[in-house]
Structure formats: C-alpha cells, structure tokens
Image: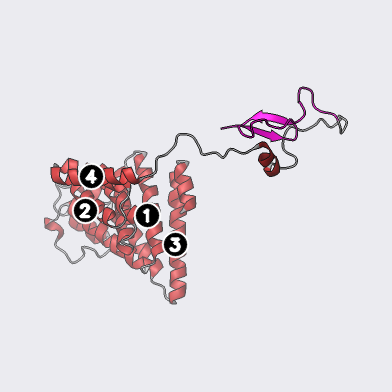
C-alpha cells in the first residue's frame, strides 16, 4: 500500500495498478496455501473475466436496434451471470449492472474475508480512479471498476472508512448523489473524517435535502473546530549555544583546507565567542551564526 501511494503521488498510475494487482494476487496465493485449497485465485480470475465482459455492454448500447444482439452477446460470454435469464427485456446498462454485482461477489469470496484484501482493493480502486481522471475512452469503464473494488472492500471490512468515503466521492463525480449519500452516511458512522462529512454536505446539497445539508454542515464544522490548528511555519526548538554544541557532530561546520596548518583558521572566520543572551544564536566550533527559524 505504501508503494502504491508513492506511485500515485508521482502520477505513475499504471505502475500503481500493476503493483496493487501483484500484491492482491500474492495475498490470494498465500490464502490458498494456508487453506490447503485452490479457490481464491480462480475466483479472482473469474472476477477479472466478468469485468472485461461487463464492458462489452458499452458496444451493446450502440447496437440497441438489434433485439437479438444482447442475447448473442450473453451467450458468447464465459460468465454465467445471465445465462438462464431472459435478457430480451433488459437494457445493456441493466445487464452490465448484473455483471458488476457478480464481479463484486467474486472479489469478496476470493478474499476469504481477509482485511488485507479490503485494503488492497481500496488502493487498487484509487489507482484505477486516478487512471480514469487522465481521460480517454476507457475512463468510464475504469471508474466503474473502481466503484466495484470500493464496494468489495467495504463489504469485506465495513470499518474501512477510507474505501467507503472514496466510494461516495467517486459516485459524486459520476453524478450519482443518491448512491453517494448512502455510502457517505456509512463512512461517517464508521469513523467519519472531515473529508467524509464535507462530501456528505455536497451530496445533500445536490439532492436538495436542506435538513440533511444543515445537519452534515454542523457536524463538519464541529469536527473542523476540534482539529488542531496547522501552523504555516514548521515547528522548531530554540537551544542555548552550549546545548547546540553538545548536540552537533564533531565534524560539523566549514571544513579547513587540506593545505592549511592544523592550528590555522579560515579567512573571515572568527573564533567562537560565548553568547551573551543564551538564546537566539547557534554556536559551533568555528563561530556564532544566527539561528535558522
């Protein structure tokens, strides 16, 4: 997770996706070994197959004039999500939702309930979301994948407020405020942060819920007041000269030229003088200098 966060900070989104997928695959291998079974990896592979097949329904939307196209598409898939269903009355969007629910179920089962899987699904969702924000034809499909991973992470570990809040935020960006509010309410109940309350304020505003907006705003303001004030300047400790000299390495300060005699001083450097105030200056073995604040 730390490596993925570093990659995301550097905008190396594809590398973050690859790193998180590798970590998930490794975890599932370990779970299969400990359980003396071969279930987690096949379920993961089935979820990836279902993801790819769900994206085929984007093509189906463009072929809506052909009533049999959706039937033929479902029959061509390996996933058995809608094999026994009457898809003639389904829209491509509704069919894709069935596939995403199936994918979420496979991801949850593959995790064997392990909390690390919840955390890794969350960070993979973050990477997919960041990749989608770059734009391109695949942006919508990447966001839907991220939504599915966030939901799976939340189902595995309901206390994973990071995944739940990120789910709500992503649904807001996809203009789905009703679904977003449901996720954000769950995020506030499992350890709400300033971000989750702020997102809930926005969700209620978009839904026109004035009472919910006011309630969320009050909680957001109260939590914001309890947060410690952040100083624009980094903290520092002021030391007396003798304390600084005791803490400083012996070889700190300017270096003497190699050719100079051992008892000589560099030009322009005065011998060390004791501080008259006892504060406000740092001292080393070559002289006094104003403290850096």
Q: Is label 3 in contact with label 4 (beta carbons under 8 Å)?
A: no
Mark 3 or mark 4, which is nearer to you?
A: 4
Whichever of callouts 2 and 3 sits on the residue coming sooner in the sequence is 3
Q: Secondary structure at mark 3?
A: helix
- The spot of residue 54 in percent (x, y) is 27, 54
Identify the magenta region: 264-293
Q: Nearer the viewer, residue 204 or 241?
A: 241
Q: Nearer the viewer, residue 264 or 277?
A: 277
- The spot of residue 169 in percent (x, y) is 28, 46
Q: Secondary structure at mark 1?
A: helix
Quadrant where the image shows the C terminus: top right
Q: Nearer the viewer, residue 56 or 195?
A: 195
Q: Residue at x 72, y 38 (%)?
A: 252
Few, some or many residues within 10 Å of mark 2 (<14, 14–19, 20+) = some
Whichever of callouts 4 and 2 sits on the residue coming sooner in the sequence is 2
Main secondary structure found in the magenta portion:
loop
In the rendered image, which quarter is residue 164 located in? bottom left
Determine the CA span between mark 1 and mark 3.
Answer: 15 Å
**Mark 4 = which residue?**
218
Q: Would residue 174 be seen by someone viewing this image from the given angle? A: no
Determine the CA span between mark 2 and mark 1.
Answer: 18 Å
Q: Would residue 124 be seen by someone viewing this image from the given angle? A: yes
Mark 4 or mark 2, which is nearer to you?
A: 4
**Mark 3 = which residue?**
25
The relative height of residue 11 versus residue 275 in the rendered view (above or below) is: below
**Mark 2 = which residue?**
182
Determine the CA span between mark 4 and mark 2.
Answer: 19 Å
**Mark 1 = which residue?**
122
């Amino acid at each position: 997770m730390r490596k993925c966060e570093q990659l995301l900070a550097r905008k190396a989104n594809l590398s973050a996706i690859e790193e998180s997928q590798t970590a998930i695959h490794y975890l599932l291998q370990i779970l299969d070994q400990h359980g003396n079974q071969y279930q987690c990896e096949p379920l993961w592979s089935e979820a990836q197959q279902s993801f790819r097949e769900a994206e085929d329904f984007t093509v189906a939307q463009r072929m809506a004039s052909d009533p049999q196209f959706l039937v033929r598409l479902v029959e061509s898939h390996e996933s058995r999500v809608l094999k026994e269903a009457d898809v003639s009355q389904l829209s491509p969007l509704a069919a894709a939702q069935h596939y995403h629910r199936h994918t979420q179920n496979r991801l949850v089962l593959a995790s064997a309930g392990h909390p690390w899987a919840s955390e890794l699904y969350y960070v993979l969702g973050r990477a997919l979301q960041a990749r989608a924000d770059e734009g391109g034809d695949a942006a919508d499909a990447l966001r839907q994948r991220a939504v599915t991973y966030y939901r799976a992470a939340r189902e595995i570990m309901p206390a994973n407020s990071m995944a739940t809040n990120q789910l709500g935020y992503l649904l807001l960006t996809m203009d789905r405020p009703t679904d977003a509010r449901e996720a954000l309410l769950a995020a506030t109940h499992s350890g709400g942060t300033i971000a989750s309350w702020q997102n809930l304020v926005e969700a209620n505003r978009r839904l026109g819920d004035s009472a919910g907006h006011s309630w969320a705003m009050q909680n957001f303001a109260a939590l914001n007041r309890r947060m410690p004030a952040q100083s624009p300047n980094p903290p520092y400790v002021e030391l007396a000269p003798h304390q600084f000299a005791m803490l400083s390495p012996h070889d700190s300060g300017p270096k003497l030229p190699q050719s100079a005699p051992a008892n000589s001083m560099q030009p322009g450097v005065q011998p060390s003088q004791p501080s008259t105030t006892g504060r406000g200056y740092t001292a080393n073995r070559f002289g006094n200098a104003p403290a850096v604040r």
